[in-house]
Amino acid sequence: MTAPHAETPFAEMKRYVRFGPDDVRALADFGGVAAPHFERIAAEFYARVREHEDAHAAFSSEEQIVGLQAMLVRWMQRLCDGPHDEAFYAERSAAGRAHVRAGLPQRYMFTAMALIRVAFEELVPELPSERHAAVRRALAVALDLELAMMLESYREDFVARLQHRERIENERLTRELARSERRYETAVELARVLVVGLDAEGAILVFNREAERLTGWACDEAVGRSFVELLLAEELRDSEAVRIMAALRGGGARAQLWEAPIRARSGRQRIVSWQLERVDATASDDPVLYAIGKDVTDERARQEQLRHGERLAAAGTLAAGLAHEIRNPLNAALLQLTYLERALGRSHAGAETLETTRSIGAQIQRLSTLARDFLEFARPTRGTRKAASLRELCVRALHGVEAAAINAGVKLTPELSSVDLVMHIEVEKTEQALVNLLHNAIEAVEPQGGGRVRLRLRREPRHAVLEVEDDGPGLSPPDAPIFDAFYSTKARGTGLGLSIVHRVVSDHGGAIEVESQPGRTVFRVRLPVGIDGAVEGS
């Protein structure tokens, strides 16, 4: 006698909620009217993600978010088109496992599905009224099936983590476990420093709360794994592994200090100042080395900003004196040259003579422009701040450089957020800083016969981000002090343009950074925003 065919988990779930042919037809009907809205819904969905730190931190880069946004469009289309078979179940399960690997908190599965439900409900009235009830039922059942499939992946992850923890705990005696718990109840857990205890092989035994907070790894996920492989940036692993193993074997000084960037679960890096302390273990599985770290990323950034400010202040003093000394003589010289040029014209002087006077005038005008830039740099004034749309500011800046881009054969590409940002800023200065960055990008790609310049605007949880990217040859060298006053890579540059941009951004409490390599240079401006209404979606 043949045994009955076993029912799959997905088939059992569909039978439980009575998902049948009527629901399939209703979803297809809904897809017919909803498909044109899928890209908009996906854009609004990830705009909401950018507003929440815990959700946004699960993604390592902007490119990843763009890819996931396209995947969400395909997800909605597949939901409506079907077929809702075992391959469909496998795809949804894989999506759930991807969220687990990225460290996306489980609560966002429900809240994200709520956003999709609301967006879909708003589209139901576009169908004939007699289909509304059937479509609403089909959407409710289908979206709940989606949640069930994705949450199965979280359950699998939680089970695996519990089993891992159980294996660790079963290897310890009651007395050793009690001693470990007392360690975690001390100031080690409360200290605002990372405390990581290692065994003789470099595996993690102790991982305190600050280490969990900074890295994104839970203690039970970190214990038993290699300190070097879990936390250190890939390019540093070989060199730092030598340092760690030497300390584990008791080589060198008892206490060692060094700085190294660590890699968080999200892929982002933080600079940590480490102190290695070797201890005498009282049991075979006690830590033999403690790595005690302090996050100094913000401190290093503040120090660099302070040094840069000091350099700007010194340069500003020089610029003010220089501009004061040369501005009036230059104006007088230009006036006298104008009289001379007119006199030569009346006396029918030769073309070569007139061209010489014009050339001299152009050079004097260039010196006058340089003096004006010096004064603008040396005596910055605090203007009036007012609410302004960053999207509109970007559009105006692009329009301001459009003629220069056309003449240079450069294509301007705006990539602006679908959700506008309104900030209180000094509008004219901010717009001029953005225009300066765009002009620099255009000039960078012009010698190679044209190229592309992109202007991006997007939201992060605590910042509005403006990016100007070009596909030119890159900076040479990549770590050139381009924001220092009087440093210029242009033959006729004053070396003040980027210094003024830096000052405008700093005056708004923001930061500017640059990434450069051949074929891609990005200037990234981050302006701080709050979650208390300092920035509003228009």
Image: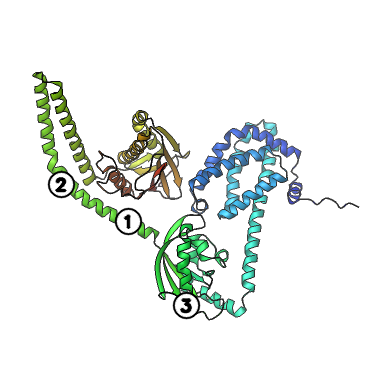
Q: How far across and how far down the image is residue 163, in percent?
A: 65, 65
Instruction: Look at the numbered disc 1 and give the secondary structure of its residue.
Output: helix
Q: Secondary structure at mark 2?
A: helix
Q: Are marks 3 and 2 in contact (CB under 8 Å)?
A: no
SS at mark 3 in the image: loop
Residue 240: x, y in percent?
A: 45, 64
Side of 200 where 375 appears, left or right:
left
Q: Residues within 10 Å of mark 2 (few under 14, many from 20)?
A: few
State how far apart marks 3 and 1 are (Cα): 36 Å
User: Residue placed at 57% from the left, 35% from the top?
Assistant: 37
Type of amino acid at the residue the image marks with label 1? Glu
Amino acid found under the numbered disc labelled 3: Val
Mark 3 vs mark 2, CA separation in Å: 60 Å
Against 499, residue 339 (above or below) is above
Q: Depth check: 237 or 261 in front?
A: 237
- The residue under label 3 is 279
Does residue 436 lie above or below 265 as drawn?
above
- The answer to whether residue 106 shows anywhere in this view is no
Q: Amino acid at mark 2?
A: Gly
Residue 304, label in figure = 1
Query: The C terminus is located in which quarter?
Result: top left
Earlier residue among tags 3 and 2: 3
Residue density around tag 1, few if under 14, some if 14–19, many if 20 or more, within 10 Å: few
Q: Are there few (<14), some (14-19), or many (20+) residues within 10 Å of tag 3?
A: some
**Residue of label 2:** 321
Identify which residue, 348 or 319, lies in the foreground.
348
